[in-house]
Image (cartoon, helix red, strand yellow):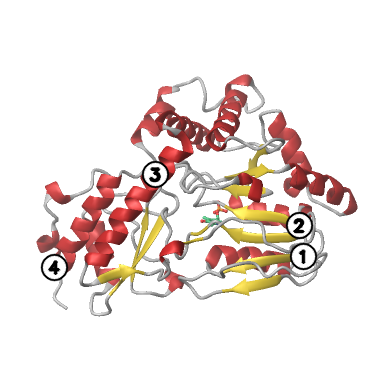
Amino acid sequence: MTDADLTIPADLLPKDGRFGSGPTKVRPEQLAALAATGTSYLGTSHRQEGVRSVVRRVREGIAALYGLPDGYEVILGNGGATIFWDIATVCLIERRSQHMAFGEFSSKFAKATAAAPHLEEPSVLKADYGHAPDAFAPVAGIDAYCLPHNETSTGVMTRIERPDGADAGALMLVDATSAAGGLPVDLTQTDAYYFAPQKGFASDGGLFFAILSPAAIERSERLIPQRWVPPTLDLGIHIEQSRLEQTYNTPALATLFLMAEQVDWMNAQGGLDWATERTGESARILYTWADKSPYAEAFVTDPAKRSTVVGTIRLEDKIDAATVVKALKTNGIVDVGAYRAAGYNGLRVGLFPAIEPADVEALTACIDWVVDRMTP
Ligand SMILES: *Cc1c(COP(=O)(O)O)cnc(C)c1O
């Protein structure tokens, strides 16, 4: 088998070959809209109306997409979801947190709180890659429950529900980095629903967004004066700046603009219901194909936990996934390799709202085409 034999017929190829799980496909229309701003936006001050109006557009757009419960606010700042873990560690967790840790991202947050000298050792509920704990295990003294809505490294999604039997006032901190925009959620079950823009919102990295409940805002207002909090991690500053439609220090203006375009597009198409229907359709296509395939199967064995925004597929051992990934790449289909640390022979496919379900269908045909031509 040579590379020349592996040119997939053009009529099988997806229109867009980007199926990565972060950064994810940016729609060409978003980029064109950014380019069309010409000299009026990039290169102008983030303290002036030109940029602040884009921050307002994003904040109002997210509020419209989710239909915010009373008193909830959309906050943003620099640093991505990773920084929000540090912000939560210093501004939202009072003494002790409980974490579900079942992949790279959820484990990292647990590590961040474990390293904090002002907090007690966190309670950590673990599960193997491809699985997730079914529920929290509330104990007295836990004041924050932390989980990802979608574990991007393994393609496992969770149900977002406050734990029964938690202490009154305990906060629910939900990492929605790959889930937001593509999975349904009842925000009244959350106190911080936080995410970065380069996954479900087809933008670029560098910012965090957090939808905060009144309880989360009150908690931060109480804790911050009691601790040394560096200004970049001070949630109070981020709240104050967000209310002014700006960020504490300079944001990535292109990221903000691409985000605004995508949020407006999703709202115009029919909002979160439309977006979750579309990711659901892409997921049905992928998992139905895997079910029928003689050589592929869903990596996540529990159908209820199979993510509809990041699909993970195990290939039978005699088919080397890295070879499949390489062949797809030479045909312009990129970033479908499994997350390395997840440790299975297989693929990971972004199913975010920006991705056309028809392209997911085309991808499955391309995988079949490549595997047919591989000699085991
Ligand atoms: C990508 C990702 C992160 C990290 O986001 P950054 O913007 O790189 O900090 C955190 N959590 C989840 C679930 C992710 O998918």
For residue 372, the mark is 4
Q: Which residue is mark 2?
A: 170
SS assignment at label 3: helix
Task: Give the distance between the C-alpha atoms of the residues marked 2 and 3, in whole angstroms.
Answer: 32 Å
Q: Position of residue 357 (x, y in %)?
A: 30, 46
Q: Nearer the viewer, mark 4 or mark 2?
A: 2
Task: Give the distance between the C-alpha atoms of the residues marked 3 and 4, in whole angstroms.
Answer: 32 Å
Task: Give the distance between the C-alpha atoms of the residues marked 4 and 2, in whole angstroms.
Answer: 53 Å
Q: Amino acid at mark 2?
A: Ala
SS assignment at label 2: loop
Q: Amino acid at mark 1?
A: Ile
Q: Position of residue 237 (x, y in %)?
A: 76, 40
Q: Which residue is mark 1?
A: 142
Q: Which residue is mark 3?
A: 277
Task: Give the distance between the C-alpha atoms of the residues marked 1 and 3, in whole angstroms.
Answer: 35 Å
- Please tell me which of labels 4 and 1 falls first in the chain: 1
Q: Position of residue 118 (x, y in %)?
A: 83, 64
